[in-house]
Amino acid sequence: MATKYIFFTGGVVSSVGKGVTAAAFGKVLKERGFRVAVQKLDPYINVDPGTMSPYQHGEVYVLDDGAETDLDLGHYERFIDIRLNRVCNVTTGQVYAEVIGKERRGDFLGGTIQVIPHITNEIKRRISLVAKTTGAEIVLVEVGGTVGDIESLPFLESLRQLRSDLGRDNTAYVHVTWLPYIGATEELKTKPTQHSVHELRSIGISPDMIVARSDTPVEEDLTDKIALFCDVEKRAVIPMVTTPVLAEVPLMLEETHAGEYLLERLHLESRKQPDWSAWKRMVEETRKDKPEVTIALVGKYVELHDAYMSVREALKHASLALGVSLHMNWILSTDLEKGKCMDLLEEADGVVIPGGFGSRGIEGKINAAHYARTNRVPYLGLCLGMQLMVVEFGREILGTDKVNSTEFDQTTPNPVIALMPEQEGVIDMGGTMRLGLYPCVLQPGTIAANAYKTDEVQERHRHRFEFNNHYRQVYAEHGMIFSGQSPDGRLVEIAELKDHPFMLGTQFHPEFLSRPNRPHPLFVAFVRAACEKAGIPFQDPPFDFDE
Ligand code: GLN
């Protein structure tokens, strides 16, 4: 069968949940027996978000192949339970770099290089790579930003061209908009949606479906009105009310028959009856009142929760499986340096130090690790969090404060965390870390091996620094177990403390592989330890929503 494409554009305002909507459509289609993949087109000129501040962009999501991508790829992977690759996140920067590279090589034989056709051809080539590299039968493509932005014009023009390139039966356009609520008159307004569709039309794209997002229920007269003014069928106007439970979105879509409508438009027939029973149970469980577990997350970007999207999601997945509800105490690491916010730490049943870069707030995170170790509070360190757990423990056992990672003190006499040899001399900051999937061999009998219930795992990485093997022996003598290592034994992948209920750090990022219906084993082990420590009743064995 010809590859089918569904294009998602956004209207009215940003942040209406276009990524979640696209992911939910992917889930609805996968449930009907199709192989799907999702691609995000990002209009910014950065080549990837790897070098962007999390304040600007939220978390950097890492794929198996080491691509540093937009956090929407996390939504796609988690919802649809798929593994994507680097062609699934395209930026304007990548497109121009490629075209200019070709121009410099003389590939265009003296031609004048223009947005149409050269840039649009490169965009279309990249869209075509998704099906080729993933085997997807239906490719969902989300354009970042909002219709009307200057930056996204070449992407929208490419999507317009694809309808004539690929044919009407193989392409569908879904426009996701926002219905503002006017408090004074107590009504939702469709005018911005009309304007946005008008704008899209002026570019040459007529949407086949409109997803109308709103904070309050959308009555039928309103969807009828949108259908009439925007020239789409009534059943192709899909109201989508805000829900705090993201996993509910595919179920809400299902009720509107939006998936069936798109299949019909693309001349496809469902291959199987969707079975939502396990997913529904999961959503019901989420909605229940449950005992609460409090987890402190200490970071330097905590004002923007999106900067830790996957960590929070992984904690939620684990809590859900354990039948407890997650409460997070977000703690700014610099506050802990000033002795502030200790109450938030003391209140917590477990402490997470996530990944991070740069020295701001580092001592605050080390304080948090010290607190967790000495008070026997469960601790989960992710990448930087593992490195700081090593630094903190080193200060204790080596009896000096002059223990550090060379990332923060290049002249420390005790560089217990040091630059990986292959990183020396690396000048380019973009895409040059140790990135993506690498194997990790587990030592039987450890907390890590017991959690994973296996002897080797593959996890996603993003780091330049590593445990300095020079210190392995002395650490081991004092009770640190290197429970996960690279197969050649050279690199410490997981460290844990012997005389502690749960103090464990990973050099990799387990959060990227957690799924709502298949929580990551290390997160489950950590949240379980937090519940045990605080005497919070939990579900044992954990719920299994993965049938
Ligand atoms: N900055 C540390 C390193 O480069 C940790 C990276 C991370 O937490 N992702 O190794």
Image (tube, rainbow, N blue to C red):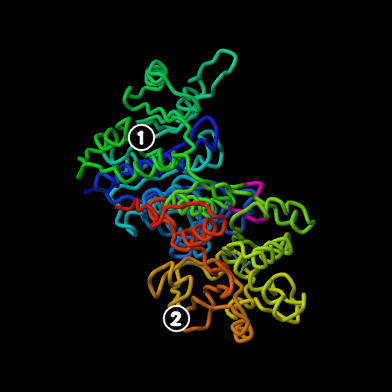
- Kind of residue at badge 2: Pro
Residue placed most toward the observer, 429 or 281:
281
Q: Position of residue 225 (x, y in %)?
A: 40, 17
The one nearer the camera, 393 or 532, is 532
Residue at 60 percent across and 87 percent down: it is 473
- Say which amino acid is labelled 1: Leu
Q: Residues within 10 Å of mark 2 (few under 14, many from 20)?
A: few
Q: To which residue does mark 1 refer?
A: 253
Q: Image check: 277 left or right of 456?
A: left
Q: Is residue 211 left or right of residue 387?
A: left
Q: What mark, if any, has residue 487 been given in the picture? A: 2
Q: Earlier in the sequence, mark 2 or mark 1?
A: 1
- For residue 514, which quarter of the picture? bottom left
Q: In the rendering, at what x and y percent does residue 227 appear?
A: 37, 21
User: Height in image: 209 above or below 465?
Assistant: above
Q: Which residues are magenta?
A: 295-304
- In this rendering, is residue 110 above or below 115? below
